[in-house]
Image (cartoon, rainbow, N blue to C red):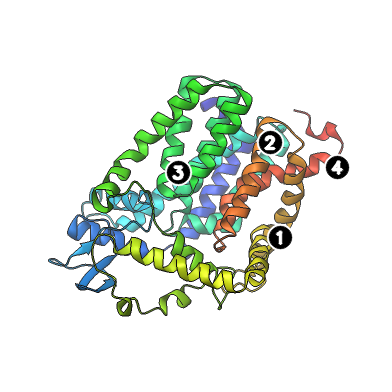
Amino acid sequence: MIKTFDNSPLFSIFFISLIARILAAFFFSDNTLVNEWSLLVNNLEVSGILGMNVVINEFEVVQKIAEEGNKVLPSIFMPPLYAFFIYVIKIFSFGILDFINVVIFLQIVINLLSIFLFYKIIEKFFNKKIVYLVTLTFSLFPLHIFATVQISSISLQLFLLIGFLYFILQCSLQSNYKNLFLFSLFSGLLILIRGEFFLFYFITLFYFFYLEKKSFKKIAVSLVITLLVVSPYLKRNYNYFNTVVLTKSFGYNLLKGNNPEFKVEGNPNFVEKYNLKSFKINADNNYEIKVDNFYKEEALNYIKKDPLRYIKYYFLKVFSFIIIDISSTYPNYFNFLHIFPKVLIGILSFIGACLSLKKDKFIRYLGIYYFTTIFLFSIFFILPRYSLILLPFQLILTMEFIRYFLPQKLFKK
């Protein structure tokens, strides 16, 4: 580790990265809990239950911060890891420190670790000059800096994702049980921060431990470790909802991204138009499950009535994820500092991903992961921050595109 940093270019990259994030924190940092995180963390503190909905009467609930004596319904809508991350920080701030500032500080530290792990991944494939350039690009990508100082799970998710990639690469190069354990640990934590990650976990197991190594023993060991990580939350959900499930938000997300008032980034206002009170849904522990099933049926009905329209919407979302959302309403989305690198890297990495499918092992896996992410997320909706989920893949795949067209001597290590 010390030898790694005994290197002026790498040290400079980390120094610049740190300064950029400190400046971003000064100008753009969140100073309070926002959106669902405010509800989940505060209601957990007040009631001991991780939930957003407070019961008003038998058929009515309201999403609000609970007060003493309110009945809070347990939530199954959001993956729990980031909420617990904030909650633990709030507890150990003891009311002395501004815990929001502590959260942002720790996210900056975690983000710098992400940059280091990304550096360790790409140094396996490219020479030092290219590694420094790509690491600096990853670090200073404007959306990457901005997201680090926001109350959002994306920074923690990005760290876990890069750690996951690093340890699966280590397993591919040196298949020992230490690397297998860490790969499985990161997999379990990723599932707890993004419920759909279990799909990518199984794809990874199949690709690396079945197709490449035919190691059923290591598949079994990894499954056990990952299950141990997620099992406390699965048990919590079984106790509350009498079903083995991590999250239940498929219907909401499907309707948010597939409705007559379509937006690539999703349209939560359309979903909120439904007067759930009029549907007489019992305000019990299964309230969120029943509401989500209702949303799912509504979304499927819209799609069935006009399938060609929603197929067109699907490919519009794919285009927006890869390149640009031409109708985005997010503030500063079309800022040149954001849109130019996004479009450039988007186009080059897409071609690089197509080329990667002709490669072998890790690079091909990155291409498979890239396409799976795009095609899966586009079923629902595409938020600007989702670009960060793809960024590590896009930068490596962009270099694969450049490697294909430039003299190979430029890439010799």
Q: Nearer the viewer, mark 1 or mark 3?
A: 3
Q: What element carries label 4?
A: helix
Q: Nearer the viewer, mark 3 or mark 4?
A: 3
Q: Which amino acid does label 2 sit on?
A: Ile
- Of labels 1 and 4, earlier in sequence is 1
- Of labels 4 and 2, earlier in sequence is 2
Q: Does residue 374 appear left or right of residue 22 in this picture?
A: right
Residue 211 horizontal/vertical position (percent)? 62, 28
Give the residue at x 69% y 60%. 323
- For mark 2, what is the residue? 363
- For mark 1, what is the residue? 343
- For mark 3, what is the residue? 190
CA separation in Å, label 2 and label 1: 22 Å
Q: What residue type is labelled 4?
A: Phe
Residue 28 horizontal/vertical position (percent)? 47, 64
Q: Residues within 10 Å of mark 3 (few under 14, many from 20)?
A: many
Q: Do the residues labelled 1 and 4 touch (CB within 8 Å)?
A: no
Q: Nearer the viewer, mark 4 or mark 2?
A: 2
Q: Which amino acid does label 1 sit on?
A: Val
Q: Is mark 3 on a helix, strand or loop?
A: helix
Q: Is mark 2 on a helix, strand or loop?
A: helix
CA separation in Å, label 3 and label 4: 35 Å
CA separation in Å, label 2 and label 3: 21 Å
Q: What element carries label 1?
A: helix
- Of labels 1 and 3, earlier in sequence is 3
Residue 286 horizontal/vertical position (percent)? 28, 60
Q: Can residue 115 be seen in this view?
A: yes
- For mark 4, what is the residue? 405
Residue 221 horizontal/vertical position (percent)? 43, 25
